[in-house]
Structures are given as structure tokens and as C-alpha cells.
Image (spheres, rainbow, N blue to C red):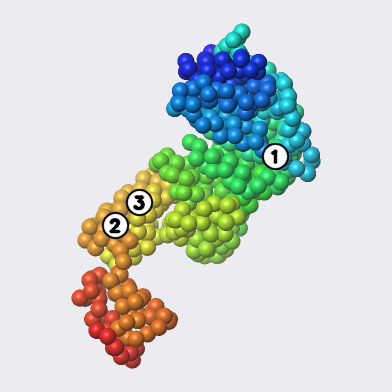
């Protein structure tokens, strides 16, 4: 593994020139350097100077073509400079000190060595000089290059101090290990376990940002196993941690739903799933501990876990500060419906049952089938193959009915407004019952979703309820 080489961009020479004129030693620091070593793409550059970072950013902006606008964040002592190639953040070298009850450091100007020492991990404490005397030279005070070679996450200083000072770094350690497929150095990992309770002073938004980055990794199960083993998961997402464990009664034992969930998550990742389908995988069995019962005849059961889990989804999203709109509703729908497709395998299944699933799943039917396929985690390869063939049959039935009835997100032609106008009703339970009865008839195939067929049925249903028509 060779030392990192800065790309031949005029930007870096311009920064070097401006820093030289101001007399500020300047360095590219952190993740950009790490990613150069790892040959990973990176669009953000952090530049640290021993001096006034904001002043350096403004000087660089004046030298660049088009004089791009510099955005200053005075509270943080930083400045952002967008360029066509890359976005650069400037800051003066700093040292930090923390109080035990706070996650916000007291920051003051420092040396390059003090700035590197406050970095979270050795792999992020790398620098490249932008100074004329040694332009492009590597700065590696803590053997970050060696840790990249060893695929190791390690703190530059005492990990207990590092994690107590900024507890979010515990999650970042696990996130980097998951994204890069690195190990966490044993003393560093033990310090996470010792300091895990400090995570309580970190805002939920920052925790969830790191959690989502773990979920978006190529093998998110690795990160969740690390979170569980060090005790962090029990603090930041207790409902997921509660899935772990196997209970036995005699010869009857259920599978470990925590490790099953992680396998389902990895399985959906392999299909190219987005963040929200990954969340559906995480939550699909979330209510199993709450619905677990032992039946002497059949063993362990989890009846209704899909409905209870779906009811839990909005509160889980709210607690984790995840969005409560369309994304949450999709996850909730997939959790509620994830057992339904397997019931459609039987040859005697009716078009009505298929119509109902298409109607309820709508445009999320493909996501639902992805989740169902991922939910097959048996170690018996023949059993897995049999289940996958069954889902092929289900998908063929779904295609046939969809081509015929076009039920994805269809809107019933008989609306509540039509019902109220026809019978002179105000919004009431009676209106809802009539609307539901017409919908059921459409899904059962007794009438088509066309006004000329559905409206006569509405009149018939109204007559049975003793309602009089006031407007045809």
C-alpha cells in the first residue's frame, strides 16, 4: 500500500499559494486522505491550517476562477468553499477540552499535533502537507497508514478519554468498521463497552444518522452484531435487541429472531434495497417477543406479530427521529403484509385473495415480494429452493390478475361523496359501511370497478339499509 498522492487539481496549489501568503501552514486532513489510501471516492475535503481557517477560505475564494462564494459558520469557526471538482471545508487547527456532563467541547486554537490528537481514529488522523517546502508529504503521527493496512479501527489516544469526551465516536467506530469491513482494535472495543452509557447525552438525530449509515453498508449485520455485543444496541434500539435469544420448552425451541432479522437484512441488501426496504427488513418481526406464546400441540407461535409490529412502526420512527411521512407508511405496510404472499401459494387460492393483496400493497408489491424472498433464511438449501419456487408461482398469479384488473393503487369508483349525495347522508359510520361493501364486491369480482356496474349495487345495498335515494 503506497502513501496517498493528492490528485493534480489546481485547487490544491491555489490553497497552498494562499496559505503561504498568509503564513499559515496548511494540510488536507482526515477522511479525504483515508479514502485516497483506500481508493474510495470522496467529494469532501477538510483543510486545516495553523491560523485563521475562515480567513484562508476567503483568500482562496478570491484566487479561484469565478470567485466562488465562501459560506462562513462563525459559531463553529469554519468556512465552506464549493468548487466544480470538490467541496472544501476550512478550519484552524484546534484543541478541545470537555466537561463530564456535556458532549460539547471547549475549543481553542492549537497546533497541528493537537488537532490530530483530537481526531476520532488513527485512520482519520492522516494529513497531506500543502506547504511549499514539503507539498504532498504525508503526515501520520499515529500510524494511521499501518492501521489501514491492518484493517483496524483504533483511537489515537486513550479510547476511554476519546469516547467519554465525544460518545458519538463509539457509534462512528462501529460505522467505519461496517463500511470498510475493518476490525475494531480490542482495547478500543472494550472501551466502547465500558463507556456505552455516555451515549445517552448524544442527540437522537446524530445517533440515527450513524445508524442509517450502518444500515446502508454492504453488510449491515456486521455493525448490528458489534452494537449488540458491546451493549450499545440495548440503549439506542432496545426493541431490536429484545429479538435476541432462544427459549426452549422440552424439545421445542424457536429460532433466534435477532440473527434471523440480520440475515433478512443482508438478504435484501443483496437485492439492491434502498434504506426504507432495509428498515422494513429490520422491523418485519419486531413484535415477535411481544406475541410469543407456547402451544403444547404446535410449539412456539407468534400469532399477530405482523399486525402488532405494523402498529408499532409509527412510534419507533418517531422515537428514532425518522421521517413520519411516505417512507414510514411504506415500512408499516410491508411489516403488516409480509406474511400474506406465502398464503397465495396454494393452487386453490382465488383471484379475490390476489386482488386484495394487490389492492393493499399497491405500488409497493415489488418491495413486498423482495422482502418475502429475503425472509427465507433456512439452512436447508432444498427448503429455500422450494420456497423460492413458491414465490415464483405467487408472482405469476400477481401478474395475471394485475394485467386483467389493474389493481395497483386503484381508486373505487364509488366514493364517500357519491354515497352521501345519493342518500342525503352526512359523514357517518353508515357511509363507511356502504363504501366498504362496494369495495368488497369489487375485490371479490362480483362487479367490476366501473360506475355502471358499481352504482346499481350501491342502490341495492342502500335499499337493504332502508335508505331513500335523494339524488340519482
Q: Residues within 10 Å of mark 1 (few under 14, many from 20)?
A: many
- In terms of secondary structure, where does tag 2 sit? helix
Q: Residue at x 73, y 33 (%)?
A: 107
**Image quadrant occupied by the C terminus:** bottom left
The residue that disc 2 covers is 398
Distance between the Cα atoms at labels 3 and 1? 40 Å
| Residue in front for this viewpoint, 231 or 148 | 148
User: In the figure, residue 197 lies in which quadrant?
Assistant: top right
The residue that disc 1 covers is 167
Residue 40 location (% of width, % of height): 49, 25
Distance between the Cα atoms at labels 2 and 1? 49 Å
Relative to 245, say whether 188 is above or below. Answer: above
Relative to 202, say whether 77 is above or below. Answer: above
The residue that disc 3 covers is 366
Q: CB atoms at circles 2 and 3 under 8 Å apart?
A: no
Q: Is residue 177 at all visible to an observer of this figure?
A: no
Residue 181 location (% of width, % of height): 54, 30
Please indicate whether residue 108 sits to the left or right of residue 359 in the image.
right
Distance between the Cα atoms at labels 2 and 3? 10 Å
Please indicate whether residue 429 sits to the left or right of residue 241 in the image.
left
* N-term-proximal mark, 3 vs 1: 1
Q: CB atoms at circles 3 and 1 under 8 Å apart?
A: no
Q: Residues within 10 Å of mark 3 (few under 14, many from 20)?
A: few
Amino acid at each position: 500500500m503506497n502513501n496517498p498522492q493528492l490528485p493534480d487539481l489546481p485547487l490544491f496549489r491555489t490553497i497552498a499559494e494562499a496559505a503561504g501568503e498568509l503564513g499559515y501552514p496548511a494540510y488536507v486532513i482526515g477522511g479525504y486522505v483515508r479514502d485516497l489510501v483506500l481508493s474510495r471516492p470522496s467529494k469532501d475535503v477538510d483543510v486545516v491550517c495553523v491560523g485563521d481557517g475562515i480567513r484562508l477560505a476567503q483568500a482562496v475564494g478570491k484566487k479561484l476562477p469565478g470567485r466562488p462564494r465562501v459560506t462562513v459558520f462563525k459559531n463553529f469557526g469554519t468556512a465552506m468553499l464549493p468548487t466544480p471538482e470538490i467541496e472544501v471545508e476550512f478550519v484552524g487547527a484546534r484543541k478541545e477540552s470537555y466537561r463530564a456532563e456535556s458532549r460539547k467541547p471547549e475549543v481553542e486554537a492549537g497546533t497541528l499535533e493537537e488537532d490530530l490528537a483530537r481526531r476520532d481514529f488513527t485512520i482519520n488522523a492522516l494529513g497531506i502537507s500543502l506547504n511549499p517546502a514539503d507539498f504532498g508529504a504525508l503526515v501520520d503521527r499515529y500510524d494511521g497508514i499501518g492501521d489501514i493496512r491492518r484493517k483496524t479501527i483504533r483511537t489515537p489516544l486513550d479510547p476511554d478519554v476519546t469516547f467519554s469526551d465525544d460518545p458519538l465516536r463509539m457509534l462512528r467506530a462501529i460505522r467505519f468498521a461496517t463500511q470498510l469491513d475493518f476490525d475494531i482494535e480490542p482495547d478500543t472495543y472494550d472501551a466502547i463497552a465500558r463507556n456505552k452509557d455516555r451515549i445517552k447525552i448524544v442527540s437522537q438525530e446524530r445517533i440515527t444518522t450513524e445508524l442509517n449509515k450502518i444500515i446502508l453498508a454492504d453488510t449491515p449485520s456486521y455493525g448490528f452484531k458489534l452494537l449488540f455485543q458491546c451493549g450499545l444496541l440495548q440503549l439506542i434500539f432496545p426493541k431490536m435487541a429484545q429479538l435476541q435469544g432462544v427459549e426452549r420448552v422440552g424439545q421445542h425451541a424457536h429460532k433466534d429472531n435477532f440473527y434471523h432479522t440480520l440475515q433478512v437484512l443482508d438478504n435484501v441488501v443483496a437485492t439492491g434495497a434502498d434504506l426504507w426496504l432495509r428498515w422494513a427488513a429490520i422491523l418485519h418481526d419486531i413484535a415477535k417477543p411481544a406475541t410469543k406464546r407456547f402451544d403444547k400441540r404446535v410449539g412456539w407461535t407468534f400469532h399477530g406479530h405482523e399486525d402488532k409490529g405494523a402498529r408499532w412502526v409509527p412510534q419507533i420512527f418517531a422515537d428514532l427521529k425518522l421521517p413520519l411521512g411516505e417512507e414510514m407508511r411504506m415500512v408499516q405496510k410491508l411489516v403488516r403484509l409480509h406474511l400474506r404472499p406465502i398464503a397465495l401459494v396454494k393452487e386453490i387460492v382465488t383471484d379475490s385473495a390476489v386482488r386484495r393483496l394487490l389492492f393493499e400493497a399497491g405500488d409497493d408489491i415489488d418491495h413486498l415480494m423482495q422482502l418475502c424472498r429475503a425472509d427465507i433464511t433456512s439452512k436447508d438449501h432444498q427448503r429455500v429452493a422450494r420456497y423460492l419456487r413458491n414465490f415464483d408461482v405467487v408472482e405469476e398469479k400477481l401478474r395475471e390478475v394485475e394485467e386483467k384488473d389493474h389493481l395497483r393503487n386503484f381508486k373505487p369508483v364509488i366514493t364517500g361523496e357519491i354515497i352521501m349525495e345519493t342518500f342525503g347522508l352526512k359523514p357517518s359510520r353508515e357511509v363507511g359501511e356502504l363504501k366498504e361493501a362496494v369495495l368488497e364486491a369489487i375485490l371479490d369480482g362480483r362487479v367490476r370497478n366501473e360506475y355502471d356496474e358499481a352504482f346499481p349495487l350501491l342502490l341495492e345495498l342502500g335499499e337493504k339499509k332502508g335508505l331513500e335515494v335523494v339524488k340519482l
